[in-house]
Amino acid sequence: MSSIPTGAAGAQTARTSLPPAASAAIYTAAVMLLSAPFWVIVARAGIHGSMGVLGLMWCPAAAALLSALVTRRPIRAFGWRWPGFGYLAAAYVIPLVYAAAAYGAVWALGLGRIDTVHYQSMLHRSVGSGLALIATLGVAIGCVSALGEEIGWRGFLVPVLAQRFGLTATSLISGVIWAAWHVPVIIFGDYNGGTPAWYSVTCFAAAVLGISFVMAWLRLASGSLWPCMLLHAAHNSFVQDFFTPLTGDTGHTAWFIDEFGAFLPVAIIAAAVITLSRTGSRLRSPRQGSASF
């Protein structure tokens, strides 16, 4: 995978008074502290039981703003520029492709089944119209919460790490922090697959680490956080609102589907390898891309 030269976050970020490692540590501490009350709320009320989820998903943005003040990193360096259409198209299509591949394999192997009756009873509409609604309005609504996370993870954290590390290390470090941030609601809440906690956490972490490579590439190659927001929203909509509800249980299906099963992480990692093998070398150098941040 391609590496990013030191300083890849651009000339704007170089004016921060703290080294990248310190800035990343400050951000990580801030996001964990701000999120703690919302972890408790979500763990008690459930993922669908309160507005705590929306509050939790905007904690990374709040932490980014606070960290920017402390480290004197300009907020305009978060990546507000509008990207090229190709980056947005990739952000939208990639989650659909890896989700379809993962669930298609589950259905083909008989580890789950297509349950149109259950799906239609949930949405009160056909599978086709349900997919159309999710692919448009669902993704658009999902962008509201996804933006809160992406301002933090890809707006602040990834460019800071990229000042010191290459693409591989930047993706892994940001992915580990991103995955760890989810662990409390996986273990203590109902954001899991109903399988043992260690299994849900392992599968989820593998999926997050895989997609972190695509997210970091999108952010640094496009100079924009908007493709990351769109990919995040598309992932949540296609996986959580379409493919998982469409899949019926054949006995042990929970072990294979959703973000907490075995198949989606494999498909995501494969998508990351394919994407970066084809596009990773197109990253801008720091000076070429600094005006885009």
Image: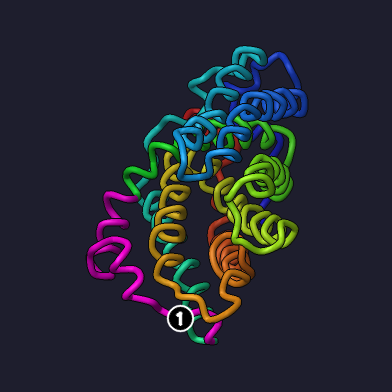
Farthest residue in the front direction? 44
Residue 44 appears in the picture as rendered: yes
Residue at 41%, 65% (x, y): give it: 245
Residue stretch rendered in magenta on the structure: 110-138
The image shows residue 47 at horizontal and vertical percentages of 51, 45
Q: Nearer the viewer, residue 153 or 18?
A: 153
Element at label 1:
strand
Q: Is residue 66 above or below residue 279?
A: above
Q: Is residue 109 above or below residue 3?
A: below
Residue 167 appears in the picture as rendered: no
Q: Is residue 242 magenta?
A: no
Residue at 55%, 65% (x, y): give it: 271
Q: Nearer the viewer, residue 194 or 238?
A: 194
Q: Is residue 275 above or below residue 225?
A: below
The image shows residue 221 at horizontal and vertical percentages of 52, 45
- Answer with the quarter of the image where residue 145 lies: top left
Q: Nearer the viewer, residue 248 or 83?
A: 248
Q: Which residue is mark 1?
A: 113
The image shows residue 31 at horizontal and vertical percentages of 64, 28
Residue at 44%, 73% (x, y): give it: 247
Farthest residue in the bottom direction? 109
Left or right side of 121 for 201: right
The image shows residue 213 at horizontal and vertical percentages of 62, 52
Kind of residue sitting beneath label 1: Arg
Magenta stretch secondary structure, dominant: helix
**How is the rendered protein coloured?**
rainbow
User: Pointer 1: residues within 10 angstroms few (<14), some, or many (20+)?
Assistant: some
